[in-house]
């Protein structure tokens, strides 16, 4: 009897699981259910499509449903799993309004994340631009006209979307309820990002909560109201975060962790449920620095976890080693990177730290194109072990975060990092790379 592997969710985690399972077990029946029309697409690329940097939305699809089918995976798009019975090992699937019950032997839950919408009047009229088709609708609306836009939320997506709208010549206001934009950075580092955003033409409003999105009779936005002011808004983008999409799995009895995501072990197995795996934005990960379970929603983790789930579902024995919160973005003319824990996260976790911040140049000072770079490092006081780092700077800054990520991953001490054999040439750095200078500054404190 052929074993049937079912996948719920056709993006990074789900299709990585399906693809590796197909290679490992040619005889396996693999069925993937995706409620949207596309598989394996880059949601991270949507702001660049909205802004016109990417002209064709199909460029965001790394592997279409047809390509997966050609590889022997039964992909069913526009097909939503609406119920899950773990005891009977069946799925209830809705396809064009009709529901059917389908069996499975092994299951990978890869339902991703869903937009966390603010509970304010008018928000229900705004569609989150989290899918290709939603991005296409937003871009079409922008092309129909209107020159004012409000972005609600000052995180990665909010900033990237604000930049995309400015690049289309729009008057853009960003409203953030917190004390700073980009809360994953410490305040002084986030201030550099805010400076870049404002110099790019984005009006940043902090410590202000949106009270209402006023819409016209046809549902299109007109203005956004806060306690202190109102802002004209022909277009509104909501970027207030996302939460794990776990309602289906939770209703079936799969356990959730403290983060609100599905609890999994290091093999991506759902505890207490043999043959049930979860991967991607809907699942927890172990944070190697904080030593606790977290939910960090990134395609890098989703692809790795999906691959591990698919391997173990087909008899393998591999583990996911955890995460350290590495992330990178481009915000206007600055690049931003972070890894490990920040000063704020250390305080919240009760972890004693020392930290240092330096300002330097991305290239040799005399070389054309050299620009500012700020590096902040966080370390353990007694051992000197590097616990985290943040970088903000012009072109050439961001990917340096990968060096810091490797150092955090390998538990290097800052005095070791200060002597690491990093490359040098004037187009890329001074004789001492900014990371080495930062490590040396922090080592002096130790």
Image (cartoon, rainbow, N blue to C red):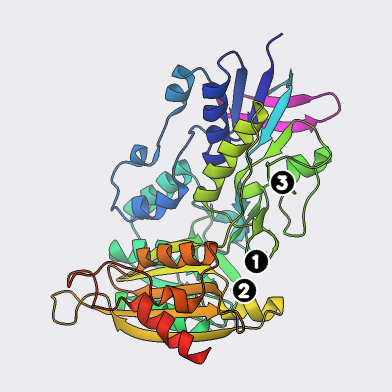
Contact between marks 1 and 2 (CB within 8 A): the answer is yes
Along the line of sight, which residue is nearer the eye, 215 or 9?
A: 9
Q: Quadrant of the N terminus?
A: top right
Labels 1 and 2: the sequence-earlier one: 1
When asked about the image quadrant of residue 161, the answer is: bottom left
- Residue under numbered circle 1: 120
Q: Quadrant of residue 172?
A: bottom left
Label 3 – label 1 distance at C-alpha: 23 Å
Mark 2 Cα within 10 Å, few/some/many (few <14, many 20+)?
some
Say which of 423 and 188 sits in front: 423
Residue at the top extreme? Answer: 1
Alpha carbon separation for disc pair 1 and 2: 6 Å
Query: Going 22% across and 75% down the picture, which residue do you hit?
Result: 363
Query: Distance of mark 3 from mark 2, alpha carbons?
Result: 28 Å
Badge nearest the viewer, 3 or 1: 3
Q: Residue at x 40, y 50 (%)?
A: 45
- Report whether 23 appears left or right of 367: right
User: How many neighbours does mark 3 have within 10 angstroms: few (below 14), some (14-19), or many (20 or more)?
Assistant: many
**Label ID, residue 211:** 2
| Element under disc 1 | loop
Towards the viewer: 137 or 30:
30
Judge whether residue 80 is colored magenta.
Answer: yes
What is the span of residues highlighted in magenta in the rendered image?
A: 75-96
């Amino acid at each position: 009897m052929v074993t049937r592997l079912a996948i719920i969710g056709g993006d990074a985690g789900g299709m990585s699981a399906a693809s590796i399972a197909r290679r490992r077990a040619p005889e396996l029946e693999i069925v993937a259910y995706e409620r949207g029309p596309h598989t394996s697409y880059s949601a991270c690329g949507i702001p660049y499509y909205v802004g016109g940097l990417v002209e064709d939305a199909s460029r965001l699809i790394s592997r279409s449903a047809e390509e997966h089918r050609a590889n022997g995976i039964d992909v069913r798009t526009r097909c939503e799993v609406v119920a899950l019975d773990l005891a009977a090992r069946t799925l209830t699937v809705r396809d064009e309004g009709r529901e059917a019950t389908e069996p499975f032997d092994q299951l990978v839950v890869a339902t991703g994340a869903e937009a966390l919408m603010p509970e304010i009047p008018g928000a229900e009229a705004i569609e989150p631009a989290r899918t290709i088709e939603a991005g296409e609708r937003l871009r079409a609306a922008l092309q129909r006209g209107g020159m004012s836009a409000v972005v609600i939320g000052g995180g990665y997506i909010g900033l990237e979307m604000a930049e995309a709208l400015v690049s289309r010549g729009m008057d853009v206001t960003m409203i953030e309820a917190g004390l700073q934009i980009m809360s994953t950075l410490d305040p002084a580092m986030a201030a550099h990002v805010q400076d870049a955003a404002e110099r790019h033409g984005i009006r940043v409003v902090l410590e202000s909560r949106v009270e209402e999105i006023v819409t016209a009779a046809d549902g299109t936005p007109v203005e956004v109201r806060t306690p202190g002011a109102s802002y004209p808004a022909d277009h509104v983008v909501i970027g207030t975060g996302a939460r794990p999409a776990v309602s289906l799995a939770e209703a079936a009895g799969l356990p959730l962790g403290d983060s609100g995501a599905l609890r999994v072990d290091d093999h991506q197995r759902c505890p207490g449920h043999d043959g049930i795996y979860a991967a991607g934005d809907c699942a927890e990960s172990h944070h190697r620095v904080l030593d606790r379970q977290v939910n960090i929603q990134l395609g890098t983790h989703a692809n790795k976890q999906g691959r591990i789930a698919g391997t173990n579902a087909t008899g393998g024995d591999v583990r996911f080693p955890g995460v350290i919160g590495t992330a990178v973005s481009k915000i206007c003319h600055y690049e931003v990177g972070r890894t490990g824990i920040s000063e704020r996260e250390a305080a919240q976790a009760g972890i004693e730290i020392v930290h240092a911040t330096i300002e330097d140049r991305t290239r040799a000072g005399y070389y054309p194109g050299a620009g500012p770079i700020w590096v902040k490092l966080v370390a353990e006081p007694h051992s000197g072990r590097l616990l985290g780092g943040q970088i903000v700077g012009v072109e050439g800054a961001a990917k340096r975060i990968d060096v810091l990520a490797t150092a955090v991953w390998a538990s290097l001490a800052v005095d070791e990092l200060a002597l690491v054999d990093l490359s040098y040439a004037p187009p890329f750095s001074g004789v001492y790379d900014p990371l080495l200078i930062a490590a040396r500054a922090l080592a002096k404190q130790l």
